[in-house]
Image: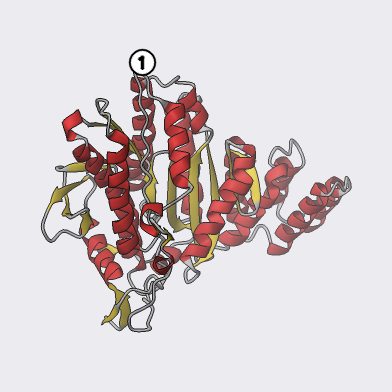
Amino acid sequence: MLRPVPGAGGAARRLRARSFRVLALTRLVARSVEKAFEDAGAKLFYSAGGRFLVVARRRPDWAPRLGVLQRSLDEELLREYRGELVFHLAGAEYSDGRIPGKALSESLNRRKRMPLGEALRTAEGWATERFFFRPPSGARCDGCAGTEEVRLAGGEQLCATCLSDRELGGRLLGHESVGLVAEAEGPLGLLGERWAVAGQRGLEISWIGHAPKHNGQLATFEELAGKGLGRPYLGYLRIDGDRIGEAFARLENQPLRIRGLSLLLDRFFSARVEKLLAGRFTNIYPVYGGGDDLFVIGPWQDTLGFASALQEEFRAITDGGLTLSAGMALAKKKQHILAKADEAEDALTAQAKAKRDSIHALGATMGWGDFRRALEAGRKLGELRARGKLRSAMLQNILELHQRWRQGDGRWHSLLYYQVERNLRESPEAGQWVKSAFLKPGEVWPQADFAVRYAMLAGSGEEKGE
């Protein structure tokens, strides 16, 4: 996977180009497999989420031919992307009309144990001189910290890849449907061919075309953070389907059913997300979407609302048969993109995925129904605080008592009742709401920490976004 690019100006534009480049190259690699086995009638069966399946008639030399193509890919990707992007090709024979799932999985796992191995090994052993890249000028790129040769552009030292990404990111603006067409000077290259971005023609790419705008231009992360409710924070949100591998396994290698599920997931995490962003969450920036996962960045309160809306749609479209989990990390506008992307990934995999069908955000992990109640409670607490009906000190008291409750202190209930009676006596509206939400019936109390943190972040003012 190509790294997101943290530094220099135009980071949003270059990040957009990097995510598209991965999707486009996946499709181009699939096309290369089709061409390599054209004499065997090779056809693309499906392509989704960085994976693809090509079907062809059996040829006795298919394995060495696939190995030659893998070597060509490894050589070019090592040279052009310096180990940041790797494609693994695996093959297996079949004779019963079913996808040879087990054999393909075993072949792919063997290939993954030696990424770029065809380019890093020779007949004599490891080509150790190819493990390191030294900057020709001794300088590093301000955009990606890479060691390619750099040149001055707009007051910054940028490598050719970052300059190309900046241009590609600009071309992608306004394209909701994207395809690739052959073009001698195109920004994308693979195995001797160049490709350019087109509209609704050429090789189709599942792509989320929406991009937040500010004064007619692609919004910067600083501008998006400024749209945060109360605190100018960004939310880095990762979403991933749960046990999707098991869902495919239940299809018993039946090709049409597998293709159908693949297309459903890919279209949902691209076209459906596109519609949701363009219609209701216009300030959210899609970094990546396809297959069964998604990564977006936007004003913190918008990402939370988007997560809730997307999960509801996913539950409806799959009739509850599939679930997804999510993790969100908070970030200030100048914090490192890579670090925050990793933090969001950890919130997803280490927290939400441990429970499944859950979200981890603002320090709390909860199921989606609990999350929606907690989100509404957070908005209500924020509203009461904005209207002067609830002071920050009371919110802090609730948070401290919630921590005591988690530690098994049974006195939290009477202490919270005392705090409400003492501190909210002159604000009966707030007092009654806190009692109903946290004491009787108290359905939101297990998620009170999330609700309070939401209200603290929201500060004062009306909510922006959805």
Viewed as shown, does residue 258 lie left or right of 200?
A: right
Q: Residue furthest top?
A: 96
**Residue at horizontal 15 percent and vertical 43 percent from the top:** 202
Q: Residue furthest front?
A: 124
- In x, y percent, where is residue 262? 37, 31
Q: How many marks?
A: 1
- Identify the secondary structure beneath mark 1: loop
Q: Which residue is mark 1?
A: 96
**How are the residues colored?**
secondary structure
Q: Where 378 falls versus 253 (above or below)? A: below
- In x, y percent, where is residue 64? 30, 39
Q: Where 376 falls versus 254 (above or below)? A: below
**Residue at horizontal 75 percent and vertical 54 percent from the top:** 398
Front in this rendered view, residue 159 or 179: 159
Label 1 CA crowd tier, 10 Å (few <14, some 14–19, many 20+): few
Q: Quadrant of residue 174?
A: bottom left
**Residue at horizontal 45 percent and vertical 19 percent from the top:** 252
Viewed as shown, does residue 258 lie left or right of 458?
A: left
Front in this rendered view, residue 465 or 371: 371
Front in this rendered view, residue 168 or 235: 168
Q: Amino acid at mark 1?
A: Asp
- In x, y percent, where is residue 196? 16, 54
- In x, y percent, where is residue 276? 36, 42
User: Image quadrant for the N terminus?
Assistant: bottom left
Q: Where 268 falls versus 351 (above or below)? A: above
Q: Is there any visible trace of residue 169 in the rendered image? A: yes
